[in-house]
Amino acid sequence: MKKALAIMATLFISLTACADHEQTIVFSELPAQAQSFVQQHFNAADIAHIEKERDGLHYEFTVYLKNATKIDFDQSGNLESIDCEIYPVPEGIIPAVIANYLKQHYPNHFAVKYAIGRHTLEIELGNGMELLFDLDGKFLRMDD
């Protein structure tokens, strides 16, 4: 009997925890740094919806724009990635050293994705080519 109650309690807690794992929030609930980023680079009126998702002990935020752009932020509001699908990543988001590299080596293409990793920065061009840079903007390699 005690074992059955323990199993039921564990199941209930698991289901309850999953129920609020992801939730839709309003713009004012984003961390201030994320709000500032969105206001600087996009029109807040273009926001389709915003999700707050629990990732272990932390939260992550995803802003979806009406044009299918997806912007991910960490719990503090730091940019993690931006996926503009088919549109260019707005100027000023990609570090200048990388933007200059792209203009010099890929003048006929533009970045549609930008992701910040622990040790690398990843750019995807509109032609599907992926470029990896170190955190200082030094080109490391190309993936296709």
Image (cartoon, rainbow, N blue to C red):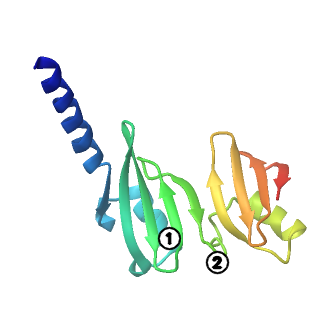
Q: Nearer the viewer, residue 39 or 85?
A: 85
Of label 2 and label 1, which has the lower sequence position?
Answer: 1
In the rendered image, the quadrant that contains the N terminus is top left
Q: Which mark is residue 87?
A: 2
Residue at screen point 81% across, 66% down:
102
Residue furthest out toward the top:
2
Among the 4 quarters of the image, the one containing residue 33: bottom left
Pinpoint residue 70: horizontal percent, then vertical percent: 52, 66
Q: Going by the image, does 117 lie left or right of 60?
A: right
- Image quadrant assignment for residue 50: bottom left
Question: Is residue 16 depicted above or below 1 in this figure?
Answer: below
Q: Judge from the rendering whether residue 32 lies leftward or rightward of residue 85; answer left or right.
A: left
Residue 25 vs residue 79, the one in the foreground: 25
Q: Residues within 10 Å of mark 1 (few under 14, many from 20)?
A: few
The local secondary structure at tag 1 comes to: helix
The residue mark sitting in front, 2 or 1, is 2
Question: Residue placed at 59% from the left, 66% from the top?
Answer: 83
Residue type, numbered disc 1: Gln
Q: Which residue is mark 1?
A: 40
Query: Which labelled disc corresponds to residue 11?
Result: none
Q: Is residue 71 above or below residue 1?
A: below
What residue is rendered at 69% in x and 58% in y? 95
